[in-house]
Image (cartoon, rainbow, N blue to C red):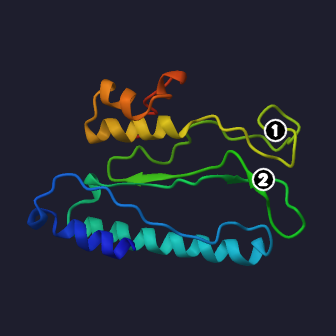
């Protein structure tokens, strides 16, 4: 999928587009069982695909114009169920690109005490500290959206103290 995205970006001028948005997907992360055998393979697939995509973007001179980020409709629990993990709430995601202020953590990294306030009281479900709206607003600003446009596109954005996480220049 990322190869097709790279090929489409490489003909951006011929398509007469200045901004493009692409969605790709990777399945198999619903690891209720067999997680120790499945997860490393999935992570290797993603790492290889992203490395190849980054190399392609650098080769065609578009890495500084590219933002890649992950999203999911749910997280995983931090306590296993014996053979995997169950559906959770919070999770960790990454953002990459030539203008991304990398090697930083946005939000908070939970401590290992699943009885702490960072977790819900069942099975180590993380409580998110950064919303998807905050990530979207940061990327939306990079795309050139105004505060008014962001408020329309992300009506819950005003519920968060920080609408720009600062990971993009």
Q: Does the image show residue 168?
A: no
Question: The residue tagged with tag 1: helix, strand or loop?
Answer: loop
Instruction: Describe the element under mark 2 as helix, strand or loop.
Output: loop
Q: What separation in Å lies between label 1 and label 2 (alpha carbons)?
A: 10 Å
Q: Position of residue 89 (x, y in %)?
A: 70, 46
**Rendered position, 163 above or below 44:** above
Q: Mark 1 or 2 closer to N-term?
A: 2
Q: Is residue 163 left or right of residue 54?
A: right
Q: Residue 127: x and y, percent?
A: 72, 38
Comparing 75 with 67, the one in front is 75
User: Can see residue 103?
Assistant: yes
Which residue is found at the position 69% from the left and 66% from the top?
A: 30
Residue that carries the numbered disc 2 in the rendered image: 77
In the image shown, does 60 or 85 lie closer to the viewer? 85
Residue 79 in picture, x, y percent from top left: 85, 55
Which residue sits at x=68%, y=52%? 75
Percent from the top left, x then y, of residue 50?
44, 68
Q: Nearer the viewer, residue 75 or 41?
A: 75
Q: Which of 106/154 is in front?
A: 154
**Position of the N terminus by quadrant:** bottom left
What residue is disc 1 on?
A: 120
Which residue: 28% across, 28% down? 146
């Amino acid at each position: 999928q990322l190869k097709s995205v790279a090929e489409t970006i490489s003909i951006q001028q011929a398509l007469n587009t200045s901004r493009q948005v692409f969605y790709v997907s990777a399945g198999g992360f619903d690891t209720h069982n067999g997680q120790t055998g499945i997860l490393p393979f999935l992570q290797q697939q993603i790492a290889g695909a992203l490395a190849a995509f980054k190399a392609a973007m650098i080769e065609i001179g578009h890495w500084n114009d590219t933002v890649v980020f992950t999203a999911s409709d749910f997280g995983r629990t931090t306590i296993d169920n014996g053979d995997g993990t169950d559906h959770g709430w919070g999770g960790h995601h990454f953002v990459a690109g030539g203008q991304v202020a990398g090697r930083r953590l946005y939000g908070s990294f939970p401590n290992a005490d699943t009885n702490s306030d960072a977790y819900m009281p069942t099975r180590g479900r993380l409580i998110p500290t950064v919303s998807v709206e905050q990530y979207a607003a940061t990327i939306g600003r990079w795309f050139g959206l105004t505060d008014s446009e962001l408020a329309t596109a992300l009506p819950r954005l005003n519920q968060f103290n920080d609408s720009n996480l600062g990971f993009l220049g």
